[in-house]
Image: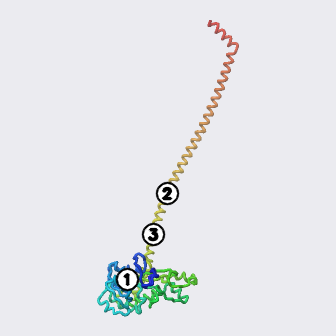
Amino acid sequence: MSDASAEQKDPAPRYDFKGIDLDSGSVHADVVTLVEEGSRVLELGPATGYMTHAFKERGCTVVGIELDPEMAVNAEKFTERMIVGDIDLLDLDEELGDERFDAIVAADVLEHLRDPLKVLVELKRFLKSDGSFVISFPNVAHGSVRLSLLSGRFDYQDIGLLDSTHLRFFTRESFEELLDDAELGLAVLHRHELNLDASEVPFDIDAVPPEVRERLEGDPDARTYQYVVKALPLSQAGLREIQARLRELAELRGTAGIVDRLNQAIDERDGRIAELETAVADIGSREGELRRALIDAHDQLLRRDAEIDAMHKAALARDQDIENVRAELTRVNDELVSALGGLQRIRTSTPYRVLDALKSLLRR
């Protein structure tokens, strides 16, 4: 299996991944959460049971079909029953009888089959009336594969997009055609993207013209490393128009939640606009308050200036009064000095002395 986030350094067993964090956003987590809790599940290719364990923890009962006997032993402890064999060759009626399932899970399995269409058609009858397929598959149209092909290379790998055990290679369109042929309607499609240069598929990035890389990075199908889909059996054969509409809806829902993100962004934008409008209104209100405060302050300054001017004029008038009083005091002082001088002359005059002598004789 080829989960982009899986550890690839442990060579044995080939498809053994650690515990699944359902909040991680990985392909495995996506597959598990598309199956409702408490479901009865038929899991194709459970490998060592890492996903089977996650189903069990969500209250599901699981029947597994695994090709590798050693991995089947590891996975069996999480299952109700383990069938060991090649799904391409098994007699499913004999193995499953009248069993029916809420979900049939094929996580990175169909690309390993010789005839995936035959398997899907045969498995449909083992679904409950409201049951569904949950399928993940690697995207051979990822930009790294395209660029590798441009350089003339198609090198198989131990794991990943060009896993050496892959017998089939799917693009989104070719997988949709497979579902059409199997009379399955695409209800959900999720993309799991990976940067072109983060893929395990080798290519010479320096040899890629910038415009080519830019175009690939702008193409959702070229950025998608794996797809996860939910598909429902159609009640009547040949309903391709309904399938096309379901596919369109699934595309809208599945491109990493693009519509939801756009709606969320619009809501956030509207919320931000409302906040800004409130802030602008608040600023306008505060501006009015500030303008009125400025007018009041200006009026107070004018009144203060008038008071200061009046005080200045009063001070000038007071200074003038003081100057007038000082001048009057000088004049009176001059008159007093003149009077004292006249009195002194009188006292020293001959008549005054004769008069003073006569007064003295009379007193005797």
Question: Which marked residue is nearer to the observer: mark 1 or mark 2?
Answer: 1
Can residue 90 be seen here? The reply is: yes
- What amino acid type should be assigned to the residue bearing mark 2? Gly
Asked if the residue at tag 2 contacts the one at tag 3, i.e. Cβ–Cβ closer than 8 Å, the answer is no
Can residue 139 be seen here? The reply is: no
Indicate the secondary structure of the residue bearing disc 2: helix
Gap in Å between the C-alphas at discs 3 and 2?
A: 27 Å
- What amino acid type should be assigned to the residue bearing mark 3? Asp
Residue 160: numbered disc: none
- Name the residue beneath numbered marker 1: 49
Q: Residues within 10 Å of mark 2 (few under 14, many from 20)?
A: few
Between 59 and 300, the residue placed more toward the observer is 59
- Name the residue beneath numbered marker 3: 270
Q: Earlier in the sequence, mark 1 or mark 3?
A: 1
- Name the residue beneath numbered marker 2: 288
Q: Earlier in the sequence, mark 3 or mark 2?
A: 3
Q: How many marks?
A: 3
Between 40 and 89, the residue placed more toward the observer is 89
Asked whether, in this view, residue 164 is left or right of residue 345, the answer is left
The residue sitting at 54% across, 90% down in the picture is 152
Gap in Å between the C-alphas at discs 1 and 2?
A: 70 Å
Position above or below: 319 against 69: above
Q: What is the quadrant of the N terminus in the image?
A: bottom left
- What amino acid type should be assigned to the residue bearing mark 1? Gly
Asked whether, in this view, residue 326 is left or right of residue 38, the answer is right
Indicate the secondary structure of the residue bearing disc 1: loop
Q: Residues within 10 Å of mark 1 (few under 14, many from 20)?
A: many
Residue 364 drawn at (x, y percent)? 62, 6
Indicate the secondary structure of the residue bearing disc 3: helix
